[in-house]
Every structure is written in structure tokens, then in C-alpha cells.
Image (cartoon, coloured by chain):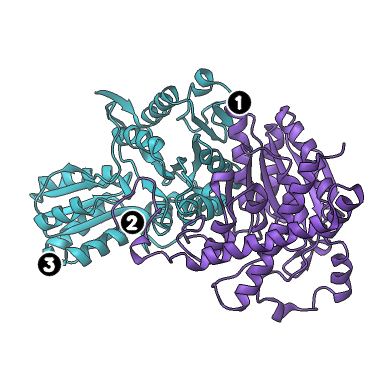
Amino acid sequence: MTEKIFAEAINEAIAEEMRRDPNVFIMGEDIRLSVYGTTANLFKEFGEDRVLDTPLSENGFFGAAIGASLVGMRPIVETVTSFMWVAMDQLISQAAKMRYMFGGQANLPVVYRASMAYGGGSAAHHSDRSYPMFMNMPGIKIAVPANSSDAKGLLKTAIRDDDPVIIFEDVNLSGTRGEVSDVDIPFGKAEIVKEGNDCTIVGIAGSVKLSLEAANNLEKEGISCEVINPRTLVPLDKETILNSVEKTGRLVVVDPAHKVCSAASEISSIVAEEGFWFLQSPIIKVASEQVHIPYSPSLEKLVYPNLDKIYSAVKSTLE
Amino acid sequence: MELTKETQIHMLKRMWTIRNFEIKVMEVHKAGEFVGPAHPYIGEEAVAVGVCSALKDTDYIAGNHRSHGHPLAKGGSIKKAMAEIYGKVDGYCNGNGGSMHLADFSVGILGESGIVASSVPVATGAGLASKLRKKDFVSVVFFGDGASNQGACHESMNLASIWKLPVIFVCENNQFAITTSYQDSVAVDNVSDRAPAYNMPGVLVDGQNVEAMHEATAEAVKRARNGDGPTLIEGLTYRFEDHSLGLGRVTKGEYRSQEEIDKWKERDPIDIHTKKLIERGTLSESECKEIENNSIEEIEEAVNFARNSEFPKPENLFDSMWANPIPKP
């Protein structure tokens, strides 16, 4: 085990997989010079046939990645969550649907790495947390790494998977440090980040870190929270969540996506359907307000989950 | 250069297969034997057959919503094509795809797309793989004049050109996007006029002439395999039937005149090719008739196969959702 910064962990996963399998290549905008910080040195090591800078044509190159994957390659596409809107036709009409639509004739081992920046004054066009929209569409696996270990292990699994995967890389974690191992992390296995007895907190992506911080502070007040990192939303490890709620009787879901039809909504509905009799109080969603991301810092900070919102949610489940 | 006798005959056979397949599809649709829309390719057969006859088995093609002709031209199973339209388990896609997704991957098809222009980036990606892995296969995409106005098309042509990919963009200009004439929706006279903007050759071909389509494709294939990059081929053709089965009730006569349709029907691609073969002495009139009759029989067998095939069972609903299956949510 070594300590790595989140962005380095991503870089390491890509480089290792590219060394292992000549069919793996990466493409995206400005990746040769690693403008987003995760593709450093790849161009130097792997050259122009494996590290491709693309024109600003998301629908074109997202689709080209699909076509390349159909004939045996394993493309990694680097992008930004908000730019995925431009390529929705290829993501939905092709990546998600092709395999089923063609009766299993198509294999699509393609990975889209979506840099998910929010909270830094990037305003409404550069701050999307869009994984819930993709959860609604069958056919794409969705990973939401919450630390360096996830960042590397989930990406390696994604690259080896024969289904299309979108990884939402929370930019708020980019500079965080964490232990990283050489083991890839399976999809659909949640991590219990902290054990506790009074209330279960499920966090999504960067909200796991926030939830853990909240749980540690609440501990000082004598409230024992169990913090769960689902790691992947498709597939979702509902067993781990349900088992935890069975133990604690309470659930708070912390999700940086907009509240309506969020990952938090889905997790809450699963627990309501399958774990209703475990519950001692209503489930609470701490998700982003149903408003666009404002530029002004005085407004932006009001939108997302924060420590105070988590404290009050947890406490209200205990009232 | 005159094509070999075998190629000339092969092209006539394939065009008859497609024509009679489509005639049968229209007939059984009218009789209510399958559900859903279908878009007849009648009148455009020379485009798919001319292009595919210039390809190797190892080359790839991708199609569109009007794509019964493409898998058949590439050598896909006729029986499985018909069974797919019937929604049966023995179809190409086990009944998951239907008429607009009539893709036989076993003969190098990368999918037929119900979303106009959506398969253009996909086919471009196969060309990218060919280049990156230093293979010699080419990738061909068939799309219409309507699709040529989609961003996906423009982005793909630019990508293919800057990366010099072995991709052949085949615009089947059948002159109408449902009811909208290409003359009202394309800013240049011909779709192929757009090629210079992507720094690739643009070739306008008589889409009713199967040999001309073959030759233009052969030239584009040569360029592609040489590493010289993509080509845009526009086959000017005509959709003899309405946009989709059943739609004729709504649109008949309102967007094009009977006179225009009749004029184009005089340029039937099968008649044109048949006449040539007889004139050259490649085949006699009766041999040509025999090809037509054989294809009718072949299609009859395909329909019987489709009729006798089973529908998928309820337990098949989730089949082929994932390569590595995950638990139901």
C-alpha cells in the first residue's frame, strides 16, 4: 500500500492498464499536456497512437470510442460531466442500448471518465453532477469513486469490464491523499467507511468524505453514525445499505446531485420498499437544491450538501 | 475497367434479394404479420449492393433506419433478417432490435441505427481502430441526405479527415427526409459538395447504377487501405415507396408528384443492370428471369422460417442486457 493523490491514482490506473493491454488507448481534449491533471506523462510513454488529443467534437469522438470498442479495442475517453450533454445521443442511443438492441452481438468495453467539478465558482455550465440521469437509463455502469483507492481500483475494473462505464471523478477530491493498493475494486461492493449504531449515512462521491467528517464530529456529541460509500451506483450494493439500516434504524443520504430523482432518491426508495420495517424515523435526503449552480460564492455554497445540513439531518432522525 | 462476370451476376442477385425481401415485407406488414414500422429500401438497391460488392468480408459497415438492404448486400442471413422483423428468437438480435436494428455482426455489421446519423461516429471509430492497430480493414457508413445535416455527420467527417481514417461515408441521397426535400434542407447543390470542407474527395455517383457505385467505392477503398484517408460518396437515388410502411396514407402526393415518382421508376436500378448484362451477353434474358425467380423462392423460405420461429419467452426479457451481468436493482 502506498499513499497517492486522487489524480495520481487515476493516472496510475490508466498507465498500468495501457501497459498490460495494447488495446487500451485514451482520447479526449487536451490530454497530451494533461490539462485536467490526470493524464500526465502518458503521451511520453505511449505515443500518438495511444494518447489522442481530439477536436471539440464530443458527439463525434464519444461515438468513435464506441465503434473502436466494437472491433476489439478498449477506449478510455476523458471528458467533463457538463460536456457529456453534447454527446448524449452517442451515450444513450449507442453506448447504453447497442448490446441489448443487437441481442448481445455487441461488446462495448468503453470507459468515459467524467471530471465532475462543482463548488469552485464554475457556474451552471461547468458544475454538473449528472450521474442520476444515467442511472435512469439501463445499459451503462456508473462508478463514483470517493477516495484515491477507489479512483484507481474502480478505474482498473472499468477498463477490464466489457460493458460501457462512466466514472464520475469528483474534482473536490483531486488533491486528497489516500492509500492505494494494486488490487482492482469490484463493482457493486460498497465500503463501510466507518461503523456506527445510531444512523446510517450513505455518501456519494465527494460526499463520502464530507459524511465521514460529519460522523467524526457527531461522535464527539455521542452520536454514532455508520458511513457507507457505495462506490458504484450501477450496480448498487443495496444489501450493505439495507443491512446497515437494519442495524441503525435510520438513514441519511448525502448526494451532491440535484435532489429530484437523485441517487439519494433511488437509495431512499429502495430502503423504503425493502427496509421499511427497519426504520425508526423518516429517511432524509441531503442533496443539492433544485436550482442551477450560481456563480456567486455567496449563493453557490447554499446549494450543495454541507456539514451543517448533515448534522441537522442526522439529529432529526434521532428526535 | 469492366467488372468480372461473377461480380456482375452477384450484384444482380443481391439486388433481387433486397427487392423481393422488401416486397415481401410490405406484403406481410399489410397482412399484419409483424408490428412496428419498417422503411422500404426499394429503388435504392444499387447503392448498398454496389458499395458492398467492393468490400472484403473483413470490412465493416454500419447502417441506418432504412437498412434492410445493407446486411443483405453484405451477405447477412436472409432468414435471420426476416425473423428479426417478425420479432422472433431466430432473428439477428433475438427479436430485440426489429426492422430498424437489422444488424448481422457475423458479416461485419456494426449496427443499424434508428436515430438518424447516430451510426456515423460509430463507424468512424471502427476506422480509428483499424488505423491505431495497423489493420487493413475499412469501415463504411450508409446515411441519408437528412442525416447529412446532423452534427454527428460533420464531426465524424472532420475526425476521419484529420486522422486520415479508412472510412467511407456513403450518402444515400434518396432526396427526402420523410417529406422534406434535400433541396430545401442542404445548403449546397449536392451533399458531396461538402467534402472539400473536410479536405476529402467528394464523389457524386448515379445511385441507380450499381457498377458506378462499385467503382466509386473501389477507388475509395484503395485510398483508405493506402492510408490516404476517407472519401464521401453520394449516391443520387430515389425512394420509390413512402418513408415508412403505413405512412403513405398520410403523406401521399403531398410532397412529391406521381409524375416525379414515375420518372424515377423508369430508372429502376435492377432494370438498368439487367439490360447491361443482356446487352453484353453476360446473361440471357431467361437467366436473368431465373435469378429473379430464385430470389422469390429464397424470400419465401425466409418468411416461412420467420413464421415458424418462436417468439422470445418472458424469461428472455433481460438477456443480453450486460456482458457481465449485474443484479436487478
Which residue type does callout 2 highlight?
A: Ala
* In this view, A2 is above or below A175: above
Q: Which residue is denoted by mark 2 in the rendering?
A: A263
SS for tag 1?
Answer: loop
User: Is the residue B97 above or below the residue B228 in the image?
Assistant: below
Instruction: Point out the frontmost of discs 1 and 2.
Output: 1
Seen in the image, is B149 located left or right of residue A310? right
Report the side of A59 relative to A213 (left or right).
right
Q: Earlier in the sequence, mark 2 or mark 3?
A: 2
Identify the residue shown where x is 64% and y is 29%.
B136
Q: What number is the disc on residue B134?
A: 1
Q: Nearer the viewer, residue A240 or B66?
A: B66
Q: Is residue B293 visible?
A: yes
Between circles 1 and 3, the one closer to the viewer is 1
Task: Tell me the shade of chain A.
Answer: cyan
Q: Amino acid at mark 1?
A: Lys
Chain ID at mark 1: B
| Colour displayed for chain B in the image of the structure | purple
Q: What label does residue A277 carry, if any?
A: 3
Residue A168 percent across, percent down from the top left: 40, 44
* Chain to which mark 2 belongs: A
